[in-house]
Image (cartoon, rainbow, N blue to C red):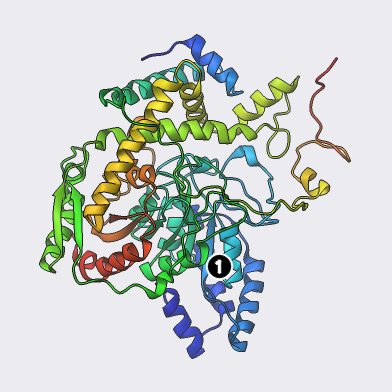
Amino acid sequence: MSTDLNTLRQLAHLARLEFDERNEQKMLGDLNEILNWVEQLRELDTTQVEPLVHLSRELNVLREDTPRNTVSHAEGLLNAPRKDSDYFRVPKVLE
Amino acid sequence: MRRFNSLTEVRNELTAGSFTCRQLVEYYLDNIQRKQHLNAFLEVWADEARQQADAVDAKLAAGTAGKLAGMVIGLKDVLAYKGHTLQSSSHILDGFKSLFTGTAVQRLLDEDAILIGRQNCDEFAMGASNESSYFGPVRNDLDHERVSGGSSGGSAVAVQADMCLASIGSDTGGSVRQPAAFCGIVGLKPTYSRVSRYGLVAYASSFDQIGPLTCSVDDAALLLEVMAGPDEFDATVSHEPVPAYSRQLEPQAHYRVGYIRDTLERPGLAPDIKQAVETTIEQLRGQGHVVDAVDFPYLDYMVPTYYILTTAEASSNLGRFDGVKYGYRADDATDLESLYKKSRSQGFGQEVQRRILLGTFVLSADYYDAYYTKAQRVRRLIKEQTDELLRQYDFLILPTAPTTAFRIGENTKDALSMYLADIFTVQASLAGVPAISVPAGHDQQGLPIGLQIMGGAFREADLLAFAKHLTETVAASVTTP
């Protein structure tokens, strides 16, 4: 399996990343190398094996749904890189 | 003041009145200062540690002190501690302060531990050498040109270099055990779900576990006992009763131990490490334990399976870093999409971006079944086979890593060669079983060798008792000249 520049650009877009031309080539090379390497899993016949999804043995861990404020409004905004008195600020979304 | 290797030693001196917790904290602060060049700590909480020490001294005098009174601990930079910076050694969390204290850390505080600072690690715990940290590599105290191991590199070196008695790290594919091996200390990864992950920055949620790095098995047992157990903030955490591990460290007379034949036949395994494991096997047999070679057909498939699953989980977990709510924001964005893209591309380092890309690939519609589901199926094979071996044997022993601490820069050019540093540690992570690395002598260059022991799920009490037995009677005598 090897992938191309178009696929890499689509992946980068999906992951909300961007690369300049030099890094694009480097990432494509790395990605292909890793994909070729993980290819060896195909040698294993897993047609009769169910995927293992959860490792925890806990089932239906429930507690009373009591309302409480763990983080206040002011605390929620504390770490924001840009904010006003009430909201996170971002570049204009609607014209 | 001399170096202490366990809390019991510290407590004896505190009881005898040889010094106070306050003086002990000054001792460690002084060591941190003198060893600054190792780059183990990102932040030192000197004044707070002094205040905590005074409070613990008062409690000791009043006879009300908790289990961890006298233990000075450092935290890997992935653990939330209210009001303190938390950055996962990443640029993208610049200036972030935690709004709450995670469960494991809170339990340390409740038992009167003294927290001395925040420790360097690989960015988002992704790495095996601490070289992916935004704040630069951690240096091994035995040889400053060599790595600490990773990702809990700062945490391991801080214990190695006597900057604190213990550290709390996190282990996804070996991140506690491998740096412990490179630094000649003890590193424990508990059973998956044994310790609450609330307040641990997520890397790969079906693997991540919090674990201690210590000088002694006794301290690892005590720290696990304090941190483990149910937590209403983590729905995955186990409700299995938590034994008093620290008081169940008596070994049994006869153990059944397996070792995977192929682990010792791998071309990349350093000869001195192979010899250390073989010597251990012979000595265990000499003590009357059964030690058998066993076959495990999936050795070559473990690291690829691990990378598919962890990168998939990471690409999802790291989606929350968008430059909007906290951390770094690019200042050259023109619209919301470019705000996300520029903040993430400038904020994440290269290794993190590589893993996000790979994770996005294996989760994409066209490749999901061929890669992600396939790896989940192989994980089941690996887990079932590992569990089966751990039904036949009390423990499996194997090297913690194929080499001792390598040189800084030696493996950074090639992502795959770095990934293969995890070859022996990912098995316990894929199977969700506990594993511990204990010191087993040194190689011919004087670098520490780590021996790894894996045990059955939730059988940490047996694992720790055997590990203590090994460090006291076997590993101590395995020294390659």
Residue A50: % across, % down = 37, 32
Residue lying at the far right in this picture: please name it. Answer: A85
Q: How many marks?
A: 1
Q: Is residue B409 left or right of residue A76?
A: left
Occupied quadrant, residue B110:
bottom right
Pick the residue in front: A53 or B259: A53
Q: Residues within 10 Å of mark 1 (few under 14, many from 20)?
A: many
The local secondary structure at tag 1 comes to: helix
Q: Is residue A66 left or right of residue B209?
A: right
Q: Is any atom of residue B18 visible in this view?
A: no
Q: Is residue B389 above or below residue B357?
A: below
- The residue positioned 55% from the left and 40% from the top of the image is B134
Left or right of A13 on screen, residue A73: right
Look at the picture and state if B150 lies above or below B163: above
Hey, which quadrant is residue B332 in on the image?
top right
Q: Chain of mark 1?
A: B
x, y (%) of residue B256? 19, 60
Tell me what residue is drawn at x 36 percent, y 45 percent: B431
Q: Quadrant of residue B339?
A: top right
Looking at the image, residue B470 lies above or below residue A12 = below
Check the image and name the residue furthest to the bottom.
Answer: B16
- The answer to whether residue B24 is seen in the rendering is yes
The quarter in which the C terminus of chain B is drawn is bottom left
The residue shown at (14%, 61%) is: B290
Give, as a three-letter code, the residue at label 1: Leu
**How far across and how far down the image is residue B450, in percent?**
29, 55
- At which x and y percent is residue B406? 32, 44
Q: Residue at x 17, y 45 (%)?
A: B264
Residue under pointer 1 = B29
